Image (cartoon, rainbow, N blue to C red):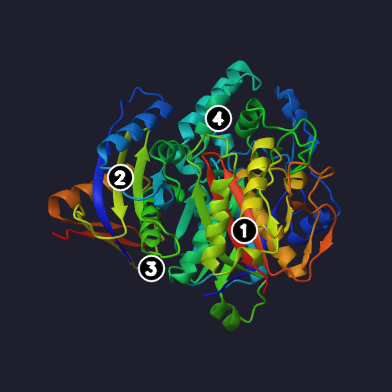
Amino acid sequence: MQAYLRQIVDLEPDTTLPYDEAITWIADKLKEQMDGFKCTPETRGIYLATLDSGAAASVAFWENALEQGPGFANPAHFPLTLANSSAAIISRLLNIQGPNYTLSGSSEALYAAFCQAIHDLSSIDESVEECLVLAIDISEKSRCVGMLMESGHSKSSLGMITEVTEFQEHDDPQPIESPTIVMSVFVYNCLEHREAFLQTGEGMICFANSG
Amino acid sequence: MKIYITGMGILTPLGETPDQLWQALVKGQTASCEWPDLKEHGFRIARACRINDGAWLDPMRGQKLAVRAASLAVQQADLPLDGNIGVFVGATMGESVAYEQAAEGKPLDLSQASIMVYPRAIQQALKVHGPQRAYGTACAAGNYALGAGIEAIRSGRADAVIAGGVEPFSRIAMTGFSRSRAMAGDYCRPFDRDRSGMQLGEAAAFLILESEERVLQRRVEPLASVESLGLSCDAYHPTAPLPDGCGMSQAMQKAVHKAGIDATEVDWICAHGSGTRASDDAEANAIARTFPHQPPVSGYKGAIGHSLGAATAVEAVITALALQKKAIPPTTNYCHADPAFTLDIVQENRSLPSLRWALNCGYAFGGLNSALLMGAV
């Protein structure tokens, strides 16, 4: 299974922004920086890996409930407590109506996001033509690193992305770090070295420049 | 490749085995009651459906529920734990109590609180090796985990999969739904004319998925098949669904299309049926739009509450039982037909000898829509 990389984004919202404003800023920038989806909204998908989406908002919402009493907490903040709140805000602003995934964890979540995106782009059943694979970390690093992938090769394709499953056992727990760190290394290698590998205990995502 | 369910484990407010839950649903029972600790804490509505073990403030509650339910599923399937066993879990926010305690000043360790702790806890407890996934896709998360489980086996990524969802009781969610005015003051009544909202629940449910080839090799009896998952997103509103239900309908159509059957072959819909006016209205529109042959529809959140990330996994267990027994339990607390709906809502226990295909639906905040097609063996 394979897909084609069309565009890379690397965004760093102001660390002082509250969570909802930071995500909205990211979504606005994604819309502005990307050359736009070519396909219809229902054939666009989002695959987001995150370690902390919703966590800070959950703590803040309960702080608010403790201060004001549960009958007075601000209801507008409740949807932000959910892990899928980042993907929900981005898909609404970018009108992504296809599959909408949020995977929780570090490198394994990012690997899973890539695998799902490549699967959906390669599958006739899914009718997905463009996928946004994102790693997002708001509370620690305030960063969003992502890739726009497409099912077919186009003039603007930067290279090909394939999945290699190795079925390695991993008894030792993987280090828990933000998926944005893993993704930024991958992105750097794609751009600088024209080939890159994102390896986890389970398998590997490979990038090869088609040029 | 045909994928079968070979074991199921649940922990719900109405039973700790699939059979206990089934019997309670058949009798029209509900776990809804008022909880003194919630009242004391200042909740205006203190009704909920909770597993009555008193351990609601344990910051590892979700992990413990997940491990117990997954172990029960493994036991029923008599699943050998060697080989490449995937663990795919759906949830909404993770260990809610850990976040609540962080708000009260305790340090927050995300590696012990976020959704990713669930598959890790199951892997460690059962000593299984293989792919693990944590889906943070809110109230549709159980279906996501099951759908990914199907793909993992079909692609050869896993020999068997432990897939499902978990949601420990959350005072954060209780506050959120209450403040959103989404909660029923007395009972949750899906699709009823007098429905006034949802009721919060908690649960864990896991299903063992295996290929037909493996089922034959192991000589185990399959309980039901899982065929295909349809997904879509409304991209419309943070909490409200598209009123015409066209996003939900898209997910339903995709599930049916992927399985290569016709929409008219769907015999029953195990609906999301949250009991809120907006969600039930949109779902009724979606069902009417997608299934003009008016298959029977039922919903069970009146019985067990809305267990958020676990809800679709619990309902997948109910769907599998219905497919096995060729019978549909009544929609809990459903008394009066809503004249706005053209649905065949199941009000009494119904025998359905021809039950072959059923659709398990679940939707989530953020506009996420999911529909899992399941089949009789």
Q: CA distance from mark 3 to mark 2?
A: 26 Å
Residue A128 pos. (x, y %) = 40, 56
Residue identified by numbered label 3: A167
The mark that comes first in sequence, 3 or 2, is 2
Task: Find disc 4 in the rendering and name its residue.
Answer: A78
- Tell me which amino acid carries mark 3: Phe
**CB contact under 8 Å: marks 1 and 2:** no
Task: Classify mark 4: residues with Cα within 10 Å, few (<14), some (14-19) or many (20+).
Answer: many
Q: Disc 1 residue type? A: Phe
Same subunit, labels 1 and 2: the answer reads no
B375 on left or right of B36 = left
Residue designated by label 1: B206
Q: Residue at x 79, y 67 (%)?
A: B352
Residue A146 circle label: 2
Answer whether labels 2 and 4 touch (C-beta < 8 Å).
no
In the figure, is residue B163 to the left or right of B278?
A: left
Q: Earlier in the sequence, mark 4 or mark 3?
A: 4
Q: Are marks 3 and 2 in contact (CB under 8 Å)?
A: no
Secondary structure category for the residue under label 1? strand
Marks 2 and 4, how far apart in space?
Answer: 26 Å
Proximity of marks 1 and 3: CB atoms separated by less than 8 Å? no
Residue B321 percent location from the top left of the image: 73, 64
